[in-house]
Image: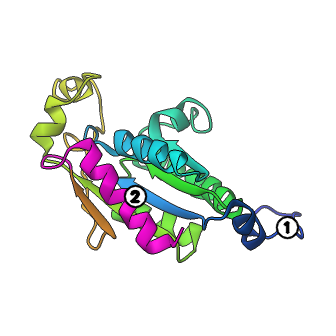
């Protein structure tokens, strides 16, 4: 999508210069998985760990984004796709700022995730599949949304009345039914250190 009569402006302070200032390389970990799988919990805990290591980070959380930037969107397939497009554009700006980014979104459709990857268009995009059986996600459902979906009171709910398409070749798989939060965070931070050389 382009905007007529506008030309992107590039200042003299480049992403590389920002990264040198911060002593880190920017990257994006895109956490995908069912609601209740642990995406947000892991991303925020990993951010806390990285912050304690002196790294500048930011977590794009699905609920937080829906309260502000994307509050005008529905949960229809079209609304979800537009939600992710906006996030992808925002992540691009944060990557240019030299920040280690983590996005926690169900993002259930492969084509939408591929579109996000294409928009962000960098070699520092990593897809993280937070894998958890549906029945365990339902047990963890503190908001009661799965129950409402099973009652038909919420439409287009991923895993119940809308599909979730598993990643075919994720860069990292976190099996949250088998691993504790700390163990998952260890895997995430180790992955970043191995791939980011920070």
Give the alpha-carbon distance from disc 1 to disc 2, as whole Å: 28 Å
Is residue 37 within the magenta segment?
no
Report whether 103 appears left or right of 2.
left
Among the 4 quarters of the image, the one containing residue 160: top left
Among the 4 quarters of the image, the one containing residue 19: bottom right
Which residues make up the magenta segment?
A: 176-198
Above-or-below relation of 178 to 93: above
| Residue 20 percent coordinates (x, y) | 72, 69
Identify the disc placed on residue 110. none
Task: Report the residue marked by disc 1.
Answer: 13
Residue at (58% x, 67% y) in the render: 120
Q: Main secondary structure of the magenta part?
A: helix
Residue at (29% x, 22% y) in the render: 143
Residue at (33% x, 50% y) in the render: 185
Above-or-below relation of 129 to 157: below
| Residue 83 percent coordinates (x, y) | 52, 47
Sort mark 1 into few (<14), some (14-19) or many (20+) by Cα contacts within 10 Å: few
Q: Say what secondary structure mark 2 lies in.
A: helix
Residue at (37% x, 63% y) in the render: 190
Report whether 93 appears left or right of 120.
right
Q: Nearer the viewer, mark 1 or mark 2?
A: 2
């Amino acid at each position: 999508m382009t905007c007529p009569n506008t030309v992107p402006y590039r200042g003299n302070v480049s992403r590389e210069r920002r990264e040198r200032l911060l002593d880190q390389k920017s990257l994006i970990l895109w956490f995908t998985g069912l609601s209740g799988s642990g995406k947000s919990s892991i991303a925020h805990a990993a951010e806390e760990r990285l912050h304690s290591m002196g790294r500048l980070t930011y977590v794009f959380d699905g609920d937080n984004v829906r309260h502000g930037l994307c509050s005008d969107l529905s949960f229809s397939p079209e609304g979800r796709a537009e939600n992710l497009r906006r996030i992808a554009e925002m992540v691009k700006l944060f990557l240019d700022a030299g920040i280690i980014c983590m996005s926690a979104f169900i993002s259930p459709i492969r084509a939408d995730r591929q579109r996000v990857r294409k928009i962000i268009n960098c070699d520092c995009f990593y897809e993280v599949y937070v894998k958890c059986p549906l029945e365990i996600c339902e047990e963890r459902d503190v908001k009661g949304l799965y129950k409402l979906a099973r009652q038909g009171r919420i439409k287009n709910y991923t895993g119940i009345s809308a599909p979730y398409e598993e990643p075919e070749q994720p860069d990292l798989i976190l099996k949250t039914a088998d691993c504790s939060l700390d163990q998952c965070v260890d895997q995430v931070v180790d992955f970043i250190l191995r791939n980011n050389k920070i």
